Amino acid sequence: MFRDDKTWLEDQPEMTPWDEGCQRLAGELGDWLEGYSQIVCEETVQQSHPGRADYVDRLWRCLGHHWRQAAEAESNGGVTAGEVAARIQSGRGYVRGGRLGGDPMRDVVLAVAMTGRDGTAPVVFQSDYYGFSRGLARRLNRRLIENPDDWWNDLVDHLAGYTNPPGRLDKFAGRCALQNWLGTVVWNFLKRWIRQEWKLTGGGEIEETGQTGHAIDESLLCFVELVREALARMSKDDVLLLYYLYYLFIEGLKQREVAAILGIVPGNVTRRRQKAIERLQALIEEITGSVMSEQSGDDFFKDIMEEPKAFAESLRKAIEEMRKDES
């Protein structure tokens, strides 16, 4: 379970000798699992539980992600698993202000229990997220809160995969807490549900009302980090070009004005723009392939296609911030 992370993990406190460190870490994960499962599962997930390996694996994916961030941020000899766990259990991460939105370790246990058809998990899930989901539904279209059970049951099925496995929660890895991750997932589900269900019942296409107000989900947070790393690998001229084309152009800057700022002929702007876009795309795909599995990468790019405006806005902000840093 820990072999792929050995290059950075073995340098952390309490991880040497390696075999003993792994045994100690596996024991800690098991203790955390049993504690969380007493809260969110029908029965405590002990050694004899048939699905224990899935729970432990997901817990490690969550803890390992945050531990590696902590190790990269720590300059005084690393950090222990217990220290990382205590921090993220309090809802604090290690990047971008550290606001996780809750305890991601507890949430990955709930996610596995949901997709594993545990009897108690849906009750806990409804207690935690029914009100949150209704709030999103109200912002999307007030008609949705007149009969919320109509879409709520379909949403739970979509997330847990009861009738069409695997459920969406199968991809939740705990990079943030579940509520942050659910924001965009629920929003996109409700938009699709409206288009399908209301057309079938003769309601026609229903216009969205109000602002989306959805929380930034896990893929969006990941995308921002990928864009920042990709931009850092690009030339200053390409970042400047993207800045003017994607930000100032919205405010009315003309192509010839961009050319004048960059000191190139107007006819070269389009060619330079295309090359910069291709370079950015290639870098994002390269970095994605190095930090994600093939399936996770596919899901990530699927999320981008489902919510292009949110990802475009995060791209614009990242380019703008990079330009300010260069200045």
Image: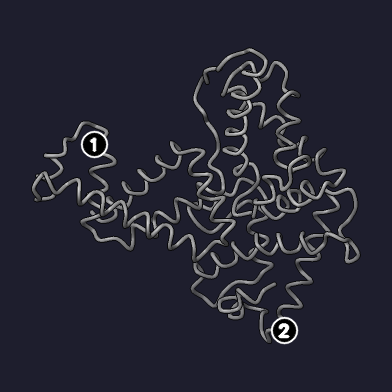
Q: Residue at x 50, y 49 (%)?
A: 301
Q: Are marks 1 and 2 in contact (CB under 8 Å)?
A: no
- Residue with the most extreme top position: 202
Within-10-Å neighbours for mark 2: few <14, some 14–19, many 20+: few
Q: Residue 313: x percent and y percent? A: 40, 40
Residue 245, percent across and down? Answer: 24, 42
Which of the two labelled residues, at mark 1 and mark 2, occupies the earlier sequence position? 2
Please state which of residues 25 and 308 is positioned toward the viewer in this rendering: 308
| 225 to the left or right of 64 | left
Q: Secondary structure at mark 2?
A: helix
Specify the amino acid type for callout 2.
Answer: Asp
**What kind of element bears circle 1?**
helix
Q: Residue furthest bottom?
A: 17
Expressed as whole percent of the image width and height from the top left, the position of residue 257 reads: 12, 39
Q: How is the image coloured?
A: one colour
The residue identified by callout 2 is 19
Considering the image in quadrants, where does the N terminus appear?
Answer: bottom right
Residue kind at label 1, given as amino acid type: Phe
Question: In the depicted view, which residue is nearer to us: 8 or 101?
Answer: 8
Q: Is residue 138 above or below residue 290?
A: above
> Dot 1, how many residues are within 10 Å of its Cα: few (below 14), some (14-19), or many (20+)?
some
Q: In which quadrant of the rendered view does residue 14 lie? A: bottom right
* Residue 113 horizontal/vertical position (percent): 79, 50
Q: Camera-side residue: 150 or 79?
A: 150
| Total number of numbered discs in the rendering | 2
Front of the two marks 1 and 2 = 1
- Residue at (57%, 23%) from the top-left corner? 139
Residue of label 1: 249
The residue at the point 23 percent across, 43 percent down is 244
- Disc ID at residue 59: none
Instruction: Quadrant for residue 125, please give it.
Output: top right
Left or right: where 96 falls relative to 33? left
